[in-house]
Amino acid sequence: MKISTKNKKIDLLILATFFALIMPVLMKLLHFSTTIKVLVFFLVYGAFSYFIGTFIKKHGLNKIFAILFPLEFVLTIFVFGIIKWSLVSALYGYFFALFFLVVTVFALLPNSQDESDKEIEKQIPIDGGIKDLENNGKN
């Protein structure tokens, strides 16, 4: 099943809402243990955070969207804490949101391999290389 709209911002909002609100509710309804929830938050949500960063970079979205998922997750933890339907302790939730933000920002950072490939493509080829230039300068 592919959820896609023409607007990538809406795609990102739908995915972030699914992972920040619907997945935690499903984990609560299915009675996941706290250990399993922490593992899911760390592994699955960490990978999703990395995906968000690469999605933002790939589609040229505004960098402010990097805070969308962590902010939705914090609001979910906060609201569920108010109604006494806690997913994990609030402190865990806030640290996980910070972790998600850091992973997303790392994914947004330029990849050194991508940058070097772009720089090589921009260079002007020189016939004979540097040695040929040095020999011509001496004459």
Image: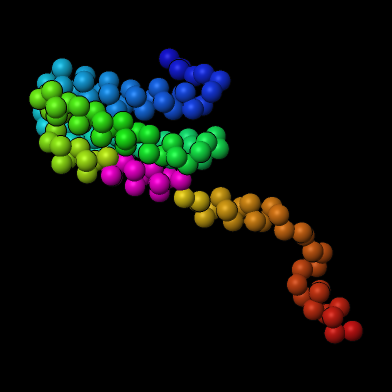
Residue 100 lies, in percent from the top left, at 31, 41
In the displayed orientation, state which residue is furthest to the right.
Answer: 139
For image coordinates 41% across by 39% down, the residue present is 66
For image coordinates 15% across by 22% down, the residue present is 28
Q: Specify the segment rendered in magenta.
A: 98-108
Q: Is residue 16 above or below residue 4?
A: below
- Residue 95 figure quarter: top left
58 displayed left or right of 81: right
Residue 105 is one of the magenta-drawn residues: yes
In the displayed orientation, state which residue is furthest to the front.
Answer: 82
Residue in front for this viewpoint, 125 or 102 = 102
Residue 106 is one of the magenta-drawn residues: yes
- Residue 52 figure quarter: top left
Q: Quadrant of the C terminus?
A: bottom right
Residue 29 lies, in percent from the top left, at 15, 17
Residue in front for this viewpoint, 94 or 2 = 94
Residue 46 lies, in percent from the top left, at 31, 39
- Magenta segment's dominant SS is helix
